Image (cartoon, rainbow, N blue to C red):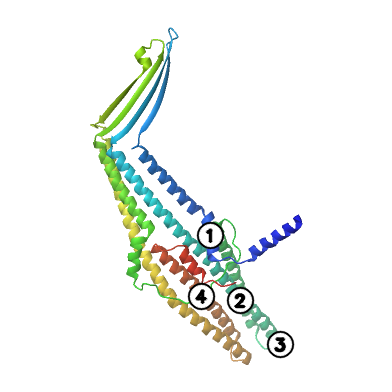
Amino acid sequence: MRLSLVIAALALALAHTAQAEDLLQVYAEARAADPVLAAADAQRGVQRELATQARAALLPQWQLSATDTRDQQDGSRSRTLGSSVSQALFDLGRLRTWDAERTLESAQDLRLRAAEQALCARVASAYFGVLSAQATLATTRANEDAFAAQVTQAQKRFEAGLSAQVDLEQARAYHALARGATLQAQQALADAREAVAELTGHPPGELKPLAMSLAAQQPEPAQPQAWVDQALRANPLLLAQARVVDASEQRIGAARAAHWPTLSAGLDSARSSGAGISDDQRRGGTQFALRLTVPLFAGGATQSQLRQAGYQRDIARDDHEAARRALVRETQAHYQAVVSGVALLDSTRAAVAAADQALASTRAGQSLGTRTMTDLLLAIQTQAAAQNAHDQARHGYVMAKLLLQQAAGALGEPELAAVNQLLGEP
């Protein structure tokens, strides 16, 4: 009975291993295992606790103290138990600090959202990197096989006295070059698969490829400025940088508030026991006090902290402006990549059709003696290059659309699901 269960479990495991993975499956694995996303989530937790700590400074504070005193001369001992409760009534510096930490917490939420969108893009890039590497390897292998066949044919023609030895040597040279390209393609594929493993924590299985019929569409809306405007409104990294600017302004307010007085209420009580303690001290007492603290001079530290906060605000503003300009450039570049990708798909599709026809005609011409071996080898190379260019164009077009959506702040699992619908069976 136990053996049958083990066999069934192995069969299920083998079936799962043999089943090709799609984009959403890889994304789910990466979301559960990616350390970059986990670090962004942990950083949000850190900032949330910093905001909690800043708020705690505005809440009541309660402290207990105990003192045990021993006289070295007569050995008598006395003990004092004290309690102190304080509540800030007016402390503008602490209030502004809390505002800044809450604003930074909001910025970290946006950074986490940006990390989630970046994970979508990284998963898609790694996934289609494997598909592109596989397409290149398939092309180089087909190229190598074709040249190998030509070497065999050239050998037979040479032995039959129908061609010169130079034709045979030329075919061998092309075959050796094609073999080198295959080895490079194998290395590139291994590296691309490791890129997926870097995200998921384990090597990927077989991945579903893009379906052969891929309908390319122009970006919608069709105006690049509309995408730029959307990116400026919704890109989470840019919005997070704007929150950092707001927080730096609030920290300037906190530094300026160091000049302001603070007001707090306190409730203190103490009770003592031991030798030499009066009855009143034993009974203890409670005092309520309002404490007004007016800062007068701190050695110039207050003004220095204010200037420091101003410099930090300037840095945040400059970083935000740099991020804004970079986002505008990247959004326009991704938009143009999609537009160019549509045209490239059409041109490479036509190139593949023409190269296939040219190769077929060259093979027929060689059999009739109107085409040389060199013509045939060049036709084989052209057909392989055209096919590989078309495969890379298909993958590049899909990635360009996803990167454009990421720049616009609109990349998530639904967008990956739409791409997932374009995948076919291996």
Looking at the figure, which quarter contains the C terminus? bottom right
Foreground: disc 1 or disc 2? 1
Q: Which residue is mark 2?
A: 142
Which residue of the protein is positioned furthest toward the top in this rendering?
Answer: 74
Q: Are marks 3 and 4 in contact (CB under 8 Å)?
A: no
Residue at which label 4 appears: 389
Q: Quadrant of residue 333?
A: bottom left
Q: Amino acid at mark 1?
A: Ala
CA gap, disc 4 and disc 1: 30 Å
Element at label 2: helix
Decide: few, some or many residues near mark 1? Use Cα within 10 Å; few <14, some 14-19, many ≥20.
Answer: some
How many badges with numbers are in the image? 4
Amino acid beneath label 4: Ala
Which quadrant is the N terminus positioned in? bottom right
Q: Secondary structure at mark 1?
A: helix
Q: CA distance from mark 4 to mark 2?
A: 14 Å
Q: Quadrant of residue 20?
A: bottom right
**Amino acid found under the numbered disc labelled 2:** Ala
Mark 4 in CB contact with mark 2 (< 8 angstroms): no
Q: Is residue 68 left or right of residue 252?
A: right
Instruction: Using the numbered discs, state the Cα–Cα distance from disc 3 to disc 4 in whole angstroms.
Output: 38 Å
As rendered, which of 187 and 78 lies closer to the eye?
A: 78
Report the Cα–Cα distance between label 1 and label 2.
34 Å
Q: Which amino acid, by three-letter code, is at mark 3?
A: Ala
Residue located beneath label 3 in the image: 160
Question: Does the CB distance between marks 4 and 1 fall below 8 Å?
Answer: no
Gap between marks 2 and 3, in whole Å? Answer: 27 Å
* 10 Å crowding of disc 2: few (<14), some (14-19), many (20+): some
- Observer-nearest residue: 106 or 88? 88
Residue topped by disc 1: 28
Whether pointer 3 and pointer 1 mark residues with C-beta atoms closer than 8 Å, the reply is: no
Identify the residue at horizontal 37%, vertical 51% (top origin).
106
